[in-house]
């Protein structure tokens, strides 16, 4: 099965890659044909990043591969932006409009998985359980396709690819926004791997996360407990108070934590303990309030347990500001591109995955169809795209890179993302983003309308305040 889904880099694909870049294309049909011709080469890039499975801020090789792909295609690269070694901007063209396409490439810890329809670790520290290997690659493909179209048609403007690291908990884009790197952008486009094809309005929960550290005094837990002060007591007292607080926060707030350090041995009173918290809600003001109350609980816990406490902000992102002008355009393009068909082999793989998720078989209509357009969405997770969406008009979509019914952050997502199913789903996004960007370059009126809507939705008094404050990028948050 592996040999079927993961082919070694083929010379034919590389040759086509170079050849098609030189062929002029004027119509949108040509653009799509060219993307089809390069899909094998892009699939190989995505699968290389899948194999690398580098975690947030450690994506050196993945970032370098995308940078090389873009620079080989004529983009100018600015690397290490916003104080982040793996963040970069690739640019082609000049003047307005400036169209940005975002790409992610970080993997998730603890989710290593083979390209198999059964749970089996590949023995690595991380896995691409959110499909960001596809995300970065498809966005790269789109940026290059738009550039080729601009060259062929003599269209002016700027196309930029934003290489945005550490989306998973690292808030990479927030530092790039804070640095002002998006300020001159007219429209920003993004997408996300999914188990269905949709370009409806998106939503996300604003969040704030921090590591609370308690410091106590070590002592023999049996011989001289009175001499000790337990840092773990501090953590437990904080957790107790925060858990009581759940009854008194606005509905739909989400609070979660893990104890990352709680001592080493029961017979030693722990002098250090750490708890890592997230607070989320679809309104960032609520998140700020809950987080401030969490800090109070931590202070109270330290006071009551005779320990001391400090905390480090780790992440913080805004909710997502929708832009229906752009969303409708993207939905129309996605409908034009259409979904995907599974080969019998892919169906067999998908049915096996579907069974592990409690389904009788894979619902392939979900991969084939485009979901009806909706102007409102429910927010479940968070994304640092939120901060971009409050800076410039932003639009996104999802495509069926996973077997229908697969949740993100699961081994099933890693597995399908490592096969031709992931590669095919990714090309739906690459094509849709390309067509959307081309329309924006051709029609200044759409850009104008999108900006008008953006300013109205954001409100006249809006001031951008990053939820993670002024901290430097948390480059070691995965270490
Ligand atoms: Zn993701």
Image (cartoon, rainbow, N blue to C red):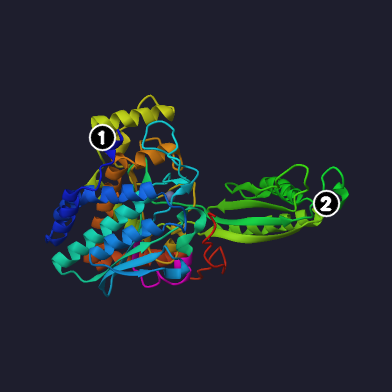
Mark 2 secondary-structure assignment: loop
The percent coordinates of residue 83 (x first, y second) are 47, 69
Q: Is residue 148 above or below residue 239?
A: below
Circles 2, 1 touching at the beta carbon (< 8 Å): no
Residue placed most toward the observer, 439 or 274? 274
The percent coordinates of residue 137 (x first, y second) are 31, 53
Mark 2 is surrounded, within 10 Å at the Cα level, by few (under 14), some (14 to 19) or many (20 or more) other residues, namely some
In reply to whether residue 433 is colored magenta, the answer given is no
Q: Mark 2 vs mark 1: give the one in front.
A: 2
Mark 1 is surrounded, within 10 Å at the Cα level, by few (under 14), some (14 to 19) or many (20 or more) other residues, namely some
Mark 1 secondary-structure assignment: loop
Answer with the quarter of the image where residue 345 lies. top left
- Residue 19 visible to the viewer: yes
Disc 1: residue Cβ within 8 A of ligand 1's nearest atom: no
Mark 2 / mark 1, whichever is N-terminal? 2
Q: Is residue 136 left or right of residue 260?
A: left
Answer with the quarter of the image where residue 15 lies. bottom left
The percent coordinates of residue 348 (x first, y second) are 30, 28
What residue appears at the point 24 percent right and 29 percent down from the top-left corner? 344
What residue appears at the point 34 percent right and 28 percent down from the top-left corner? 351
Marks counted in the figure total: 2
The percent coordinates of residue 403 (x first, y second) are 35, 36
Which image quadrant: the N terminus?
A: top left
Residue situated furthest bottom in the rendering: 95
Q: Which residues are magenta?
A: 175-188
- Residue 192 visible to the viewer: no
Answer with the quarter of the image where residue 143 lies. bottom left
Q: Which residue is mark 1?
A: 342
Residue placed most toward the observer, 96 or 52? 52
Q: Which residue is mark 2?
A: 228
Residue placed most toward the observer, 437 or 250? 437
């Amino acid at each position: 099965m592996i040999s079927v889904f993961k082919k070694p880099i083929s010379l034919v694909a590389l040759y086509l890659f170079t050849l098609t870049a030189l062929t002029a294309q004027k119509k949108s049909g040509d653009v799509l044909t060219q993307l089809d011709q390069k899909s094998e080469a892009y699939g190989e890039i995505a699968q290389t990043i899948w194999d690398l499975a580098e975690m947030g801020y450690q994506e050196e090789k993945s970032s370098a591969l995308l940078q090389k792909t873009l620079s080989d295609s004529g983009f100018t690269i600015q690397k290490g932006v916003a104080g982040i070694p793996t963040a970069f901007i690739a640019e082609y063209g000049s003047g307005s409009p400036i169209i940005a396409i975002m790409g992610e490439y970080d993997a998730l810890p603890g989710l290593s998985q083979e390209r198999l329809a059964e749970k089996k670790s590949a023995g690595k520290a991380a896995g691409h359980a959110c499909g960001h290997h596809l995300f970065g690659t498809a966005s790269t493909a789109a940026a290059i396709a738009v550039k080729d179209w601009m060259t062929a048609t003599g269209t002016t403007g700027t196309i930029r690819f934003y290489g945005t690291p550490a989306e998973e908990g690292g808030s990479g884009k927030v530092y790039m926004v804070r640095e002002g790197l998006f300020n001159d952008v007219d429209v920003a486009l993004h997408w996300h791997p999914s188990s269905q094809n949709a370009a409806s309005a998106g939503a996300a929960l604003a969040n704030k996360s921090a590591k609370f550290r308690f410091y106590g005094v070590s002592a023999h837990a049996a011989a001289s407990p009175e001499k000790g002060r337990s840092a773990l007591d501090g953590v437990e007292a904080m957790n107790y108070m925060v858990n009581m607080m759940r009854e008194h926060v606005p509905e739909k707030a989400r609070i979660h934590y893990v104890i990352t350090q709680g001592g080493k041995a029961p017979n030693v009173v722990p002098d250090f303990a750490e708890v890592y918290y997230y607070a989320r809600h679809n309104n960032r003001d609520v998140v700020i309030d809950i987080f401030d109350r969490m800090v109070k609980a931590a202070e109270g816990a330290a006071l009551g347990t005779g320990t001391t406490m400090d905390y480090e902000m780790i992440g913080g992102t805004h909710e997502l500001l929708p832009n229906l002008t752009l969303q409708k355009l993207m939905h129309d393009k996605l409908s034009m591109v259409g979904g995907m068909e599974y080969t019998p082999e892919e169906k067999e793989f998908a049915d096996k995955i579907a069974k592990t998720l409690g389904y009788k078989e894979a619902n392939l209509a979900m991969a084939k169809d485009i979901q009806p357009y909706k102007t409102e969405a429910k927010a479940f997770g968070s994304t640092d795209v939120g901060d971009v969406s409050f800076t410039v008009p932003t639009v996104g979509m999802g495509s069926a890179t996973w077997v229908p019914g697969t949740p993100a952050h699961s081994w099933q997502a890693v597995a399908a993302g490592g096969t031709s199913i992931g590669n095919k789903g990714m090309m739906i996004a690459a094509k849709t983003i390309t067509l959307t960007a081309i329309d924006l370059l051709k029609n200044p009126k759409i850009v104008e309308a999108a900006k008008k809507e953006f300013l109205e939705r954001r409100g006249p008094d809006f001031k951008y305040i990053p939820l993670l404050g002024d901290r430097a990028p948390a480059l070691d948050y995965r270490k």
